[in-house]
Image (tube, rainbow, N blue to C red):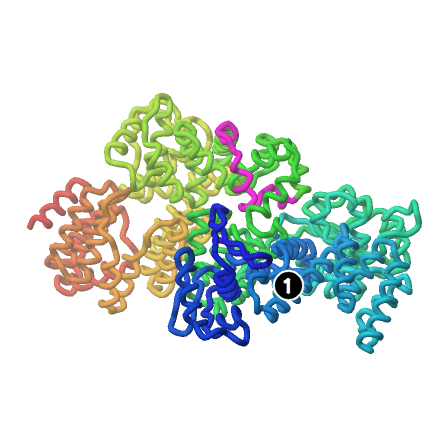
Amino acid sequence: MRFGILGPLDVRTDTGERVAVGGPRPRALLTILLLNAGRVVGVEQLIAGQYGEEPPAGAANAIQAQVSRLRKHLPVEFDGVGYRLAIDPLDVDVHRFRRLAGDGRRSLASGGFREARGLLREAVDLWRGPALVDLPFGQAQLAWLEELRLAALEDLAEAELALPEGTSVAELRRLVAAHPLRERLVGLLMRALHAAGRTAEALTVFDETRRSLVEELGADPSPELADIHLGILRAGRPRRHGVAAQLTSFVGRERELGALGEARLITLVGPGGVGKTRLAVEAARRSAHETCFADLSPVHEHVDQAVLAAVGVRDGGVPGMSPADRLVTALSDRELLLVLDNCEHVVDAAAALARRLLGACPGLRLLVTSREPLGLTGETIMQVAPLGAASAIRLFADRAAAVRPGFELTEDNLGAVSSICATLDGLPLAIELAAARLRVFPVEEIAARLTADGRFRLLSRGDRTAAARHRTLHAVVEWSWDLLSADERELATRFSVFAGGASLDAVEAICGDITGLVDKSLVVAEGGRYRMLETIRLFCAAGLTDAIRAEHARYYLRLAQKADPHLRRAEQLVWLARLSDEHTNLMAALRHDPETGQRMVAALAAYWWLSGRRGGAGEPAAGLLELRPGLEEEYVACVLHAVPHAAPEHWERAAEILRATRRPLRHPFLAPLWGMLVGPVAFEAGASHLGGDPWGEALERLGDALLAMHSGDPARAERELSEVLDRFRRLGERWGTAQAMDGLAVLASWRGQWERAEELWRDALAMLNELGSVEECAQVLGRRAEARLRQGEPEAAVRDFREADEHAGKAGLPAVSLLGPAAAARLRGDLDEARRLLERVPEPTTGFGLEGRRARRLTELARLERAGALHREAVSAARRSFMVADLAAAVEGLAEAVPPKQGALLLGIAVALRGTALAGDPDVARVAAAATAALGAEAFAERFGMGAAMSRADALTAIDEVVSG
């Protein structure tokens, strides 16, 4: 319900229907309760309000009867002491009036004159006539309310005088006539007359007031009124608008403040909410010069008149003299810093006025804030960027502490605060709006809701005294949007399709010329790229159409397909960087439609692998596992990237497609990718699946060399790898070069050529790091760590294992080196640590080299637990691996679990399988020493030599006999 006592008592329902209250006594009773809405009023106070100082004997009973009648319509409660009307005080006009008047006064004090005017006008308009007319004995309350009303009217006139439109002289005359000795009202009337060019009348008002004060009070005018009179006599100007005092602290921006310098025209440019006004206010506050602040946000024409009022120049003067002329006259001999705030919607008029004033007033400096530059020669433009992470977090914490006293940054909430600031692009206004929500939500909930509900929905309430465009995040962006032409809005909508910024080529292809959007701070140009703040992009993206998204997808598919062959050449770093810049757009295009998605996966396969981003492709690729005619290779690419989502039938179908390939692959990188993730491809005999280009030929030789290395022919592998290394070096292709170096380093470490291995691995890692291939770095570091264990450098090995896991984590992969640290712990005698690490090693279930990985895990477990059965299980698993090096390692493990005679034989067989002895292996050395001690050196050498001389077939037969026995 709604209640009114600022005039005759008025009670209405929510639908506006009037509610009858009854006779004078109930109306008086209700008036008292409404004055104290929500609070208990004692019975004595109710009696005094109705009957005065001499109530009748039955007054208390009468009050009780009146309350009973009121309860039929209203929630009147009794608490044993008195009665309370259980309603929201703001449902009563007097309490709304007090709230609005108070807000208006605070806004006036902070320099928000237009907002103050609106609040105060709304407050005084609530008065429908004399207040409390239904309360016969309410003289004290009436006097109090009349004083509040007069103060609000004075504040309203004060706010109106500060605005270009001015105030009503007639209304002030009426008020002064009713209250001739109220000096603030008199001063306001004098200022209004003076601003209207009626100086003589203003002086007459002062003389009349002075006589009245002397005659009636025997007092002179107050110093404040005398100062106004003196200013008018000296043809002084109305009050100049300096920089308003700020209610909150200034955070960050010290670099920007230091860079402002002393240029005569500086324009702070940036998107809405980035803090241009606050930076200008702080710069003016710290300036050694006289300052003046002109807020142009409410001005749509007559910019010169608005500045005239702000500077404090009397609105009037010589007939035919324009406001700009009067400004020049007033400022021509003054040293002044003039802040022109919010010029974007009147930029042409502001630019013309700035040119005129700067040319005619040598002591004048202008500090302008706008979402686009004025475009004047000599203008110094400072782009105001969002706050950096540290300043943004500090701002949130500062504003949060004001809203929720005691709020502090802690380890527990720092992540949520950082997320909020990052999500809001570091925009100060958005951060302040988010901090204000701490009145309702904890900080973690705000962070979650920004993601789940969207920033515009959550940040939909702000400071009620702020300018309308700053009360919500949506309004901040909408202000800029409304200033755009129809063509510019279409450009902004088209640009919003770019998820992660864009290159100039992409912008011109999708949008055209966006110079206007850059000038108006909707698009930021930096480092050859263009981007929108995510807050602005999301606003503009509301108008995106499927047609625009399709253009975007087609452009980035063409880019990916164009880049792919360059990734296999010397210029691969340039193209990797270009694709990395466009990564977010490429991923968005991939999701546009299934066919484009499959083509994108195939085109980006090399990019993802080389740059260490393969893990991010898994989920979208898993949604594209449908075989389409003509897109067989693209389907294979999706299967390869859908790990671990692709079902076995997809892997079988993809393998069949590759086996049936009788022509060069359109996407050559699929061949090495399949080899690294699944194993060697069994292509049709004679099929040239990689074509005849130099990279394809080098890659085929690389595959042959690695097969030779893992098939027990290290000598041939080394010859092939040396040739492959030379070929990739001539091409300038880093990935292939690093592969060859890694293979040669492994071979060198087998032979104990530690310095050569170290040099090769160092160079390989440098190239892989240059590419950004974190997954391959993890694998190479793991192999180097294993070699360092054999070299007798366990500390260096553990460091490599840890670094390998860090790289794996960057690629979104689990730890790759738990077996190595477990072995290191076992070798130094820390069996508990070794067990702890081995317990964390998952049972391998899928992927390339599955049986080899399973065998290595079982061998390490067997060595730790001295379990012969586990060694035999490891050999059985390794027998199923295509890499004989896996079998050799398992056989060396089994050698410790059999009698010395068989152990010596198995150690020799391992050499036969691998094609060389493994230098420095401490476990092999321990087993060999034990067997030698048991058999004697000559017998050991005989058995070892027998195994080392075996053919592959004989070796496998001997292994089976040992395992089965």
Report the residue that reaches farthest toward the front. Answer: 57
x and y, in percent, of residue 414 in the image: 46, 63
Q: Would residue 534 appear left or right of 86 to someone viewing this image?
A: right
Of residues 129 and 616, the one drawn nearer to the viewer in this rendering = 129
Report the residue that reaches farthest toward the left. Answer: 965
Of residues 428 and 308, the one drawn nearer to the viewer in this rendering = 308
The answer to whether residue 562 shows anywhere in this view is: no
Residue visible at 30% across and 61% down in the picture: 821
Label 1 element class = helix
Q: Which amino acid does label 1 sit on?
A: Arg
x and y, in percent, of residue 652 in the image: 25, 31
The answer to whether residue 813 shows anywhere in this view is: yes
Of residues 678 and 710, the one drawn nearer to the viewer in this rendering = 678
Which residue position holds label 1? 106
Tell me which corner region of the image, top left, top right, bottom left or bottom right, holds residue 578. Answer: top right
Tell me which corner region of the image, top left, top right, bottom left or bottom right, holds residue 708. Answer: top left
Residue visible at 84% across and 74% down in the picture: 215
Q: Quick check: is 538 in the magenta stretch?
A: yes
Q: Would residue 925 appear left or right of 344 to someone viewing this image?
A: left
Residue visible at 43% across and 59% down in the picture: 441
Q: Give the magenta part as a residue range.
A: 521-550
Report the residue that reaches farthest toward the bottom. Answer: 218
- Establish if 846 lies above or below 169: above
Q: Quick check: is 214 in the magenta stretch?
A: no
Neighbour tally class for label 1: few under 14, some 14-19, many 20 plus, Cα within 10 Å: some
